[in-house]
Image (tube, rainbow, N blue to C red):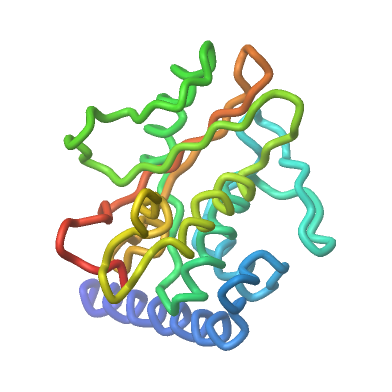
């Protein structure tokens, strides 16, 4: 009976997620307008971010989206990721505390210099990873980082499955990678007043020879 009960609970969870996703996709932002507040995208993201409370410094993040008010940094990261993904009809990501812990460890190492460095040596990535640096003098938020990465979408050619010559688009393709299911991110205020943000993804995207969606 226990395996059957577990199967029924799992099936109910998947059914509920599909209903949420159907509503989210029906009202998902069109390309180029990912960031207008969408309550359905927020609700799906919050549901996939169980236990996400407070900001990275232990306080509620102060970002507001359409009157949303204070919310957790984790939900903010997840909301913007899922807004971009749903514009491409991709399933929403879920928050991973393990990936968050990894990202937080790397962000802590960058606090002293705010250097825009990846946590893996080039070509040895075990996780997907996007990084962002914002200079001193601005209150850089998770949405700023995701918007910056997603803006590369204009330089990605689906037909060629490549970036425009001389341009980058790997941050964008990682966000919308169809097989990526989990993300965990961290934001740290650096000693020089700048902001460093990093997100890790699993399964990782940007597999050579494959298209993101």
**Direction right: furthest residue:** 67
Query: 158 or 125, which is in the foreground?
Result: 158
118 relative to 60 in the view: left or right: left
Splitting the image into 4 quarters, where does residue 136 fall?
top right
Give the quarter of the figure containing the C terminus: bottom left
39 relative to 93 in the view: left or right: right
**Direction front: furthest residue:** 165
Q: Which x, y percent locates residue 173?
A: 36, 59
122 relative to 158 in the view: left or right: left
User: At 57% across and 47% down in the image, what residue appears?
Assistant: 74
Q: Which x, y percent locates residue 95?
A: 45, 52
Splitting the image into 4 quarters, where does residue 13 fall?
bottom left
Q: Which x, y percent locates residue 201?
A: 35, 49
Q: Which x, y percent locates residue 122?
A: 22, 32
Splitting the image into 4 quarters, where does residue 60 fall?
top right
User: At 55% across and 51% down in the image, what residue appears?
Assistant: 146
Please say if 84 is above or below 196.
below
Give the quarter of the figure containing the N terminus: bottom left
**Tally of numbered tags:** 0
User: At 47% across and 56% down in the image, what residue appears?
Assistant: 152
29 relative to 18 in the view: left or right: right
User: At 44% across and 42% down in the image, what residue appears?
Assistant: 199
Please say if 186 is above or below 183.
above
Please say if 86 is above or below 182.
below
Please say if 180 is above or below 31.
above
Query: 161 or 44, which is in the foreground?
Result: 161
């Amino acid at each position: 009976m226990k395996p059957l009960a577990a199967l029924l609970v799992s099936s109910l969870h998947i059914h509920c997620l599909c209903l949420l996703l159907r509503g989210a996709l029906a009202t998902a932002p069109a390309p180029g307008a990912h960031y207008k507040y969408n309550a359905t995208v927020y609700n799906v993201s919050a549901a996939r971010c169980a236990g996400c409370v407070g900001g990275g410094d232990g306080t509620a993040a102060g970002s507001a989206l359409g009157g949303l008010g204070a919310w957790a940094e984790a939900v903010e990261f997840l909301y913007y990721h899922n807004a971009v993904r749903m514009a491409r009809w991709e399933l929403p990501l879920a928050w991973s505390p393990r990936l968050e812990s990894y990202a937080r460890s790397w962000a802590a190492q960058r606090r002293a210099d705010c250097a825009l460095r990846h946590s893996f040596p080039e070509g040895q990535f075990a996780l997907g990873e996007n990084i962002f640096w914002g200079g001193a003098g601005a209150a850089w938020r998770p949405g700023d980082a995701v918007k910056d990465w997603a803006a590369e979408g204009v330089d990605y050619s689906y037909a060629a499955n490549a970036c425009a010559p001389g341009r980058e688009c790997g941050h964008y393709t990682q966000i919308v990678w169809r097989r990526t299911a989990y993300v965990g991110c961290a934001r740290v205020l650096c000693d020089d007043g700048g902001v460093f943000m990093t997100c890790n993804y699993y399964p990782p995207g940007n597999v050579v020879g494959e298209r993101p969606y």
